[in-house]
Image (cartoon, helix red, strand yellow):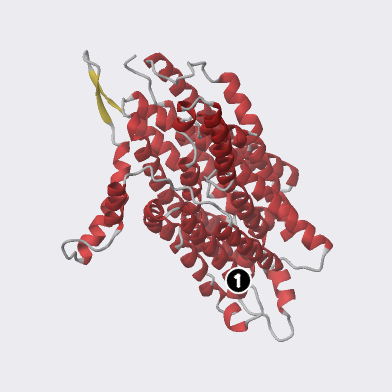
Amino acid sequence: METTSSVAATLEEEPLLSSNRGRESDLLNRRSGMRVLRTRRWSADPYWVIPIVLAVNISRGMTTSPRIKVYNDIACRAIGSPGPTNGLISFLIDDCQSPAAQARASKIQASVITIMNVLSSASTGLWSQWGDVQGRKIIFCVSIVGFITMELVFLLVSGSIPSLTSRGETFILVGPVLEGLCGGLSVFNGVVHAYISDCTPDGSRSRIFSAIQGIMFVGLAIGPWIAGVLISFTNLGPYSLFYISIVIQLALLMYIIFLFPESLRSKVQPSSRLDVVERASPVTSRKKSLADVIKQFLVALVSPITIFVPRTVDDGASSWKDYNLTLMGGALFLYIISTAVYPLKYLYGQHTYSWSSVQLGYYMSLLWISRAINLLVILPVIISYFKPKIPATGASSPESVALELQFDKRLAQASLSVDALADLLVAISPSSSQVSFIAYSCLSAYTSGGNPALHSLGAVCLHALGHGSETGRLFGALGVLSAVAHTISPTIFALTYSLTVSTYPKTIFYVAAGLLFTAVLLLARIRVRGW
């Protein structure tokens, strides 16, 4: 219904329609309108993205639990070999739940995540810039190819090829290298947002962005349930899910190539697009040395973060340093680092309660369902009820800007505080209680509004400084900040878990809670001044 309405609204805005009033012209226009309507059925629209987001995340949800099993199996093979009278199965049953195996598995997982994030952060800018010139479809295809190669590597490592399984700890690193070079989830999420931005008017994107994020968690929630049904009611094993995931994504690749419409409009003048091509091209008027190339790369990586440098504000009567963006950036950085506890939370649950792949999949699905419910139902209700009432034209007066800044700040503080409380409750609750572990994990899942609230808070802080036109630069800087945090966070938590798993494995939850409470304190220092 919304698509039809938008097409109708666009047709009404056509200059040709508004300038002709005669009957013959009206008839011609109706025929022309029907032709345009038929054409626009295949034109870019945000709804074309929904099957891609849903299918990619269903595939991810299906194979998340088998990936944990692959890490455990590789760790078991690495710490010892079964004797001639002891088969591999009995060895895995006896020793795979040992602290040594768990520590090794967490290190393998951290290596995979770190390599992928480092390469993704390095390649995201290149792919994004190339997509601005060549179009979005090719970037979608590159991302899907990267996901397929990652699944293929996991499948080969878990298979029955002795030369690969015996070197699984090394060969599995090929997967994150290939997916990282293709940009990984960083490029995929970026091109999804870019596609939606191409085919939606300014000012109407927040709702669709929230909906897309909710659909992402719906896909992640459905995936483990599909995997559980297939394993429980068929003869398929956990590693067969990699085959199914590859088939789904191959079908998705065909959908993108043959049905998915390109969204990149010629909003930019040809000369401007030529400038972009020239900036993206490695060939320049003078020959550059390797040192120049490295310097340019480092400048391109670091320069966006300078937006978080404190700014001097002068209202005529007095001047002061504004640290709001600095504090928001620090809070977001700590929050993203704290999210690295989730993969280890899966390892902790499987280790402590001896969950099977199916049980672990159901647990992860429950968390993702909770996040989807929060994003699609609970959070919109809270925002609509508590958000300050401002004119439909937006926050233009200093008072309305101040009210919105305070609202986003409190929403982010509340989300992060509850998230920290949930981790703290997991840490202090009895390890023997599965119910409390699951309940407190679900509680943290209902705080998924923290990330969008922090992004919104950053935009409002920038607008309050009178630099609202730099919003694109701000989100680029937040992307760099996120990539750096995702790069270092797995190592921090994996090292903590490997050192404490044999003595007190709940230490990781104290670390996460400490990071979140520190982020809340940084947000508390954000001030509304000058109005």
Q: Residue drawn at (46%, 45%), measured in percent from left and top?
A: 194
Q: Residue furthest right?
A: 233
Question: Callout 1 environment at 10 Å: few (<14), some (14 to 19), or many (20+)?
Answer: many
- Residue nearest the viewer, comparing 235 with 212: 212
Q: Is residue 304 above or below residue 70?
A: above
Q: Quadrant of residue 375?
A: top right
- Residue nearest the viewer, comparing 278 with 390: 278
Q: Is residue 77 above or below residue 214?
A: below
Q: x and y percent of residue 483 in the render?
A: 42, 50
Q: x and y percent of residue 203 in the render?
A: 46, 30
Q: Residue drawn at (67%, 37%), measured in percent from left and top?
A: 373
Q: Is residue 16 above or below residue 140?
A: above
Q: x and y percent of residue 371 in the render?
A: 63, 40
**Mark 1, residue position:** 74
Q: Is residue 449 visible?
A: no
- Residue nearest the viewer, comparing 154 with 260: 260
Q: Quadrant of the N terminus?
A: top right
Q: Residue drawn at (70%, 74%), measured in percent from left and top?
A: 91
Q: Is residue 297 left or right of residue 262?
A: left
Q: Quadrant of the C terminus?
A: top left
SS category of the residue bearing label 1: helix
Q: Is residue 35 visible?
A: yes
Q: Is residue 59 above or below residue 239?
A: above
Q: Residue furthest bottom?
A: 84
Q: Is residue 123 left or right of residue 174?
A: left
The amino acid beneath tag 1 is: Ile
Q: Quadrant of residue 312?
A: top left
Q: Is residue 329 left or right of residue 74?
A: left
Q: x and y percent of residue 276 in the render?
A: 30, 51
